[in-house]
Image: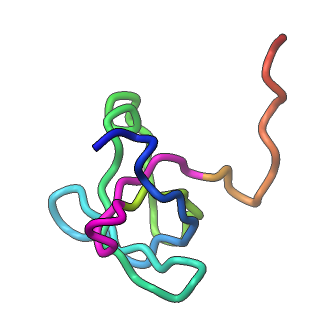
Amino acid sequence: MSKKDLVQVSGEVEKILGGGRYSIKLDNGHTITAQLSGRMRRYHIRVIRGDRVTCGVSPYDPTHGFITYREPPGGRPQAPPKT
């Protein structure tokens, strides 16, 4: 399954589970188990309880996903991309 097939949803980290997994409470009320995507692991992006994240969820297994983005703390916008 490619990245294009994943459904992007937003939520908040509820619990940190063992083995690099996280319990995520989605904005629609559902709870999923998610793990960090490859690039987030590669660049050592830390995710803690209470962080807002974006997850990619498979339409075939909506209880599991990959954390693809951690929003900046405080909801501050990041610097605009260089052109």
Measured as percent of width and height from the top left, residue 81 is found at 79, 22
Which scheme is used to colour this image of the protein?
A: rainbow
Q: Which residue is more in the foreground, 60 or 47?
A: 60
Measured as percent of width and height from the top left, residue 71 is found at 63, 52
Please state if 36 lies on the left or on the right of 80 as rendered. left
The residue depicted at 81 percent of the width and 31 percent of the height is 79
Vertical placement of 62 versus 2: above or below? below
Q: Residue furthest left?
A: 19
The image quadrant of residue 73 is: bottom right
Q: Which residue lies furthest to the top in this view?
A: 83
Region of the chain picked out in magenta, as a range: 58-70
The image quadrant of residue 11 is: bottom right
How many labels sit on residues?
0
Vertical placement of 5 versus 58: above or below? above
Q: Within the magenta stretch, is there residue 60?
A: yes
Image quadrant in which the C terminus is located: top right
Q: Which residue is more in the foreground, 67 or 48?
A: 67
Image quadrant in which the N terminus is located: top left
The residue depicted at 17 percent of the width and 66 percent of the height is 18
Q: Within the magenta stretch, is there residue 21?
A: no
Q: Which residue lies furthest to the bottom in this view?
A: 29
